[in-house]
Amino acid sequence: MGMSFPATRLRRLRSSEALRRAFAETSLDPGDLIAPLFLKEGIREPVPIASMPRQYQHTIESLVKEARSLASKGVAGMMLFGIPEHKDPEGTEAWNAGGITQRGIRALKDELGDEALVIADLCLCEYTDHGHCGILKGDTVDNDPTIEAYGQVAVSQAEAGADLVAPSGMMDGQVRAIRSALDSSGKEMTPILAYSTKFASAFYGPFRDAAEGAPRFGDRRSYQEDPANLEEAVREALLDVEEGADALVVKPATSYLDVVRAVKEATGYPLVAYNVSGEYSMLLAAAEKGYLDERAATLEVLTSIRRAGADLVLTYHASKAAEWLA
Ligand code: PBG
């Protein structure tokens, strides 16, 4: 069989760039990437996010410009996070047809048409004055009224033109509630990209500055998943499929590559992994110090996420990586 040395020399297929390219098992293209973008109401100029180099809180104008640039680099789409001026206990701005997110979605769709996807993050933490992902009862999030509210948010985002809605609040039954709200509003063709397995992670730190959605008290461990749990993560994903999810998200990505693989194998569903803010900022901080090479490290991380089983990667590296992959 020639299965051992010296007949077998695995280095043969590694011995030139052309051989390595031809036999690579995993591909990485701009079309595999989705860029998260932040849109803030009430600012006149884009505001750089201190904890996330090269990322901004955008105005509608700068958002559209960035989206144009991303689309021309061939990325698959963008995930929009809106930050309203007015916050209240229920997060009512989240389903205002004239709200900042809805205006952003419209502006993006006008610019992009079918060139790239506009995905709406669907949560309440950017809209509530307490920063939790839903409506409170005492000091915990009340599940069932919250998913009703999510249904309204989904309809308003779909009506604004979102190609997909992406519920990230980790409430039980959220996918079913959103599917039924969309269906009864004539939006039965709007797909749901469900963050089915979202862990209570320290790696969201920089995002909470960017989206101004840090909880004012407590933490999110009564709704987001315990980083220790893989079997539960698979159960979450299977439940979301049963409730009508069209595609799934695992988040964060790099500390959870085993979850990416397990969810892919258990569901066979289209899978997106979210390479979150802390993963991005950590790499860029190390690169800034000269501890590692940004380009090589970034492409290695993104390739690893694809290798683990993600079809698409949501990443703040999207713009740079798409340039490098051109
Ligand atoms: C909240 C939300 C979070 C992220 C996306 N949506 C943070 C959180 O749960 O606190 C994190 C994304 C990132 O860190 O890049 N619905």
Image (cartoon, rainbow, N blue to C red):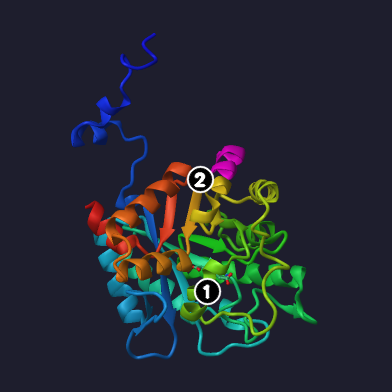
What residue is rendered at 65% in x and 48% in y? 230
Q: Which residue was labeled with disc 2?
A: 270
Quadrant in the rendering for residue 45: bottom left
Q: Which residue was labeled with disc 1?
A: 205
- SS state under label 1: helix
Q: CA distance from mark 1 to mark 2?
A: 27 Å
Residue 65 vs residue 308, the one in the foreground: 308
What residue is rendered at 27% in x and 74% in y? 65
Q: Quadrant of the N terminus?
A: top left
- SS state under label 2: loop
Farthest residue in the top direction? 1
Which amino acid type is shown beneath numbered disc 2?
A: Pro
Q: Residues within 10 Å of mark 2 (few under 14, many from 20)?
A: some
Magenta residue span: 261-269
> Is ligand 1 closer than 8 angstroms to the Cβ of mark 1?
yes
Which amino acid type is shown beneath numbered disc 1?
A: Gly
Q: Main secondary structure of the magenta part?
A: helix
Q: Position of residue 27 (x, y in %)?
A: 34, 42
What residue is rendered at 54% in x and 42% in y? 261
Q: Which mark is residue 122?
A: none
Residue 15 vs residue 73, the one in the foreground: 15
Residue 256 vs residue 268, the one in the foreground: 256
Farthest residue in the right direction? 138
- Ligand 1 rendered quadrant: bottom right
Left or right: residue 112 versus residue 148 is left
| In magenta segment, residue 262 | yes
Q: Earlier in the sequence, mark 1 or mark 2?
A: 1
What residue is rendered at 60% in x and 77% in y? 125
